[in-house]
Amino acid sequence: MNNLIDYIEWRGDISFDKSPLNNVDLCVFTQMMMNLDFLNEEMTIEEANHKYHEIGKEEKIGLIISDDCIKLFDLASASIRFKDIKIIRYYNNVLEKESVDDTKTQLQFGAITFKLPIKKPYYVIMFKGTDDTIAGWAENLHYLRTGHIPADDLAISYVNEHIKTHKGKFSICGHSKGGHLAINTPLYISKEAYRALDIAVSFDGYGVEKLENKRRFKKVINYIPEDSFIGLLFNHYEKQIVMKSSSKGFYEHDAFSWEIKGCNFVCGVLSDNAKIIDNSTKQITSAMTDFEKEMFGKVFENMMLNSGIHNLLELKQDEKKKKLLSYYLTMNRKERLYFSRPIAKLGKSKAMTLFFIGSVKEVRQRIKYEKRNKTTK
């Protein structure tokens, strides 16, 4: 079945004037996750791609970010449909704790504004999902306790600033945490910005803690795979569309696994497994006190800080893994329980066991695929 890569190869020779922007296009934008910090002026996607490779290609973007993101960026930059799209604004901010005594809240926020090459001004604002930084993962856990993260405020400000200087319709999109920002941001932006907002599309993004400005959800959509886990977390009041994935378990969260036919995602049905896991997760988190939620996130942060781990790729280093295990074993029993008890409770669910088995099988298949690719090169 076709995926995002196949979509660009199929639709890439047709401009937006002939075939208008669709939600698969928005998903393509969400996967442009490369580090583009060199962007200090407006550039087309074609120019940005050339510059990206000129300064030195990143062989590995991250542990959980698909390497296909680079392939997608390359294909988009060579296609009639995407190459002349202008990147008019790029923002990336990561705020990390220096030590366990540091009191600041960790932050990871990224956004890109694209301008389509069509007659009427039209923009796409893409919010980045959680990358490999530990700061980003710690921030997600902060949402568990407070129902709010610093990235929420930055996303709202980003959109309100955009509308002050750029007249015309715009869409918002994002994957994972970026999807959460796509759901949350329309609820709180200015009236002027909301009027200009065409649609906000989340791709397997987690929801919101509170129901506010309910009428604004009518412009929001959340696409989720059949075995969604992330895309069901917290509360969802927006329209949800279930789609098929070629992967299993947690790997259904990978946007490159989502099946596409023409200009649409192939519709699926939310699995019973996903419903059971979602129900179990909500029961476990609702039974936790605010203090237990805070300690869950704090223990995670402390484990990473004391092990010197700043991004997920470092978890592949034997020395860092040993430090992490050593710190975990030396923690007092109370601390360990704050972190392990909620995970253990969720793990008791048969549905989660099946979800985990599916993820392990997927990992094995991907390792075999990578080995085959290396031997054929």
Image (tube, helix red, strand yellow):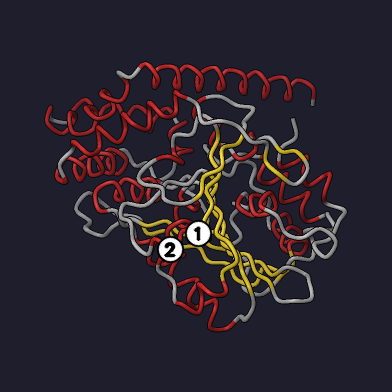
38 above or below 240? below
> In x, y percent, where is residue 80?
85, 58
> In x, y percent, where is residue 90?
58, 67
Name of the residue lying farthest toward the right? 13
Q: Using the numbered discs, state the Cα–Cα distance from disc 1 to disc 2 in whole angstroms.
A: 6 Å
In this orientation, which residue lies closer to the viewer: 357 or 61? 357
84 above or below 285? below
In this orientation, which residue lies closer to the viewer: 280 or 346? 280
Check disc 1 and report the residue beneath it: 218
Check disc 2 and report the residue beneath it: 215
Q: Residue at position x 55%, y 46% from top?
A: 203
> In x, y percent, where is residue 40?
61, 73
The amino acid on which the numbered mark 2 sits, given as a three-letter code, is Arg
Quadrant assignment for the N terminus: top right
Q: Residue at position x 30%, y 44% from top?
A: 305
The amino acid on which the numbered mark 1 sits, given as a three-letter code, is Lys
Q: Residue at position x 26%, y 60% from top?
A: 104
Residue 37 visible, this angle? no
The quarter of the picture where residue 156 lies is: bottom left
In this orientation, which residue lies closer to the viewer: 65 or 96? 65
Residue 377 visible, this angle? yes
The quarter of the picture where residue 112 lies is: bottom right
Quadrant assignment for the C terminus: top right
Q: Tell whether 273 sits left or right of 118.
A: left
Label 1 with label 2: CB-CB less than 8 Å? yes
